Image: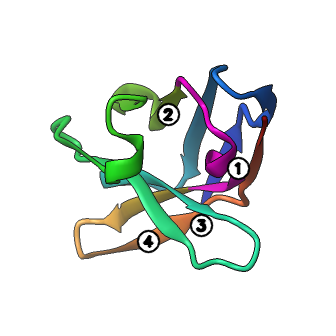
Amino acid sequence: QVQLVESGGGLVRAGGSLRLSCTASGSIFRINAMGWYRQAPGKQRDLVATITSGGRTDYQDSVKGRFTISRDNAKNTVYLQMNSLKPEDTAVYFCNADVYRSPLGHRDYWGQGTQVTVSS
């Protein structure tokens, strides 16, 4: 089994910063892409940012220039540095990883989510 554990959420004022972390553990052969998604109340879960094992990144337009995704492959950990936070960034943030448990196949795993609340 594979577990993703997130940390770093919380309450911050508009303009502030937070750093999210997510570590994958368990029976892992290799991790491909890792990413962050978010879901606000009453809305669908949306992609925030992704990063490949080689370090290529992609961002939702609304967070470009404010958020930075990075990863430490040796630690199976992905980070999301969030700066210049806005109230509309308020959501539950979920970590995602595309994991090979063996060379034969892979699937997506999700963390339990961490709440980020930005006050105006």
Question: CB of mark 4 within 8 Å of CB of mark 3?
Answer: no
Give me the residue at 50% from left, 33% from top.
Answer: 80
Do we see residue 30 in this rendering? no
Q: To which residue does mark 2 refer? A: 80
Estimate the spatial distance between the alpha carbons at disc 4 and disc 3, rounded to whole Å.
12 Å
The numbered disc on residue 90 is: 1
Local crowd size for mark 4, using a 10 Å CA cut-off: few (<14), some (14–19), many (≥20): some
In the image, which residues are magenta?
83-94
Q: To which residue does mark 3 refer? A: 1
Q: Indicate the amino acid at tag 1.
A: Thr
x, y (%) of residue 54?
15, 38
Sequence-first tag of 2 and 1: 2
Image quarter (top left, top right, bottom left or bottom right) of the C terminus: top right
Q: Indicate the amino acid at tag 2.
A: Leu
Image quarter (top left, top right, bottom left or bottom right) of the N terminus: bottom right
Q: Is residue 14 magenta?
A: no
Sequence-first tag of 4 and 3: 3
Give me the residue at 23% from left, 66% from top.
Answer: 103
In the image, 28: left or right of 65? right
Q: Is residue 115 above or below residue 64?
A: below
Q: Indicate the amino acid at tag 4.
A: Asp
Sequence-first tag of 4 and 2: 2
The quarter of the displayed image where residue 64 is located: top left
x, y (%) of residue 50?
33, 50
Camera-nearest label, 3 or 1: 1
In the image, 95: left or right of 90? left
